[in-house]
Amino acid sequence: MQQAEGTGGGLVCLFEDAWDSVKQQLTLGRFRQDADIKMQLQFASFIEFDEVEAVKGYPAGELLETFADAVTTIIDEIERVVTGIAAARI
């Protein structure tokens, strides 16, 4: 946990590794209600698919892009079929 002082004198507690997997919640810090906090934060994320054998070892970014492309293709195909069905009914 890192500590910093805000300009309003409110104590700030910044938490490292504060992911609560049960709550699916990330706590970045706790601030006093009267604190006037000014700071710059940088965030990074890490996604791991290591427990899924079919995608184990592949970069997460590439996998997510592939999944997004697949969903787009499926939606486009559904739209094409539905449009054809609608046109046939007219």
Image (cartoon, grey):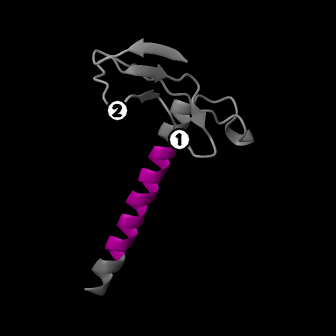
Q: Name the residue rendered at 51%, 35% in the picture.
A: 26
Q: Nearer the viewer, mark 2 or mark 1?
A: 2
Q: Position of residue 68 (x, y in %)?
A: 46, 45
Callout 1 amino acid: Gln
Does residue 4 appear to the left or right of 17 in the view shown? left
Q: Dot 1: within a 10 Å radius of its alpha carbon, few (fewer than 14), some, or many (20 or more) residues?
A: few
Residue 40's disc is none
Which secondary structure, mark 1?
Answer: strand
Spatial separation of the CA atoms under disc 2 and disc 1: 21 Å
Which of 1/59 is in front?
Answer: 1
> Would you name the residue on which mark 1 appears?
25
Please tell me the numbered disc located at residue 33. 2
Residue at the image point whose x is 32% and y is 72% from the top: 83
Majority SS type along the magenta span: helix
Amino acid beneath label 2: Gln
Residue appearing at x 74%, y 40% in the figure: 53
The reply to whether the magenta stretch includes residue 71 is yes
Q: Is residue 68 magenta?
A: yes
Q: Which element is circle 2 on?
A: loop
- Whole-percent x and y of residue 89? 30, 86
Q: Quadrant of residue 88?
A: bottom left
**Quick one: label 2 or label 1, which is nearer the N terminus?**
1
Q: Quadrant of the N terminus?
A: top right
Q: Nearer the viewer, residue 3 or 72?
A: 3
Direction from residue 9 to residue 29 in the image, left or right: right
Looking at the image, is 43 positioned above or below residue 27?
above
Q: Which residues are magenta?
A: 67-84
Q: Is residue 27 left or right of residue 41?
A: right
Q: Is residue 5 left or right of residue 36?
A: right
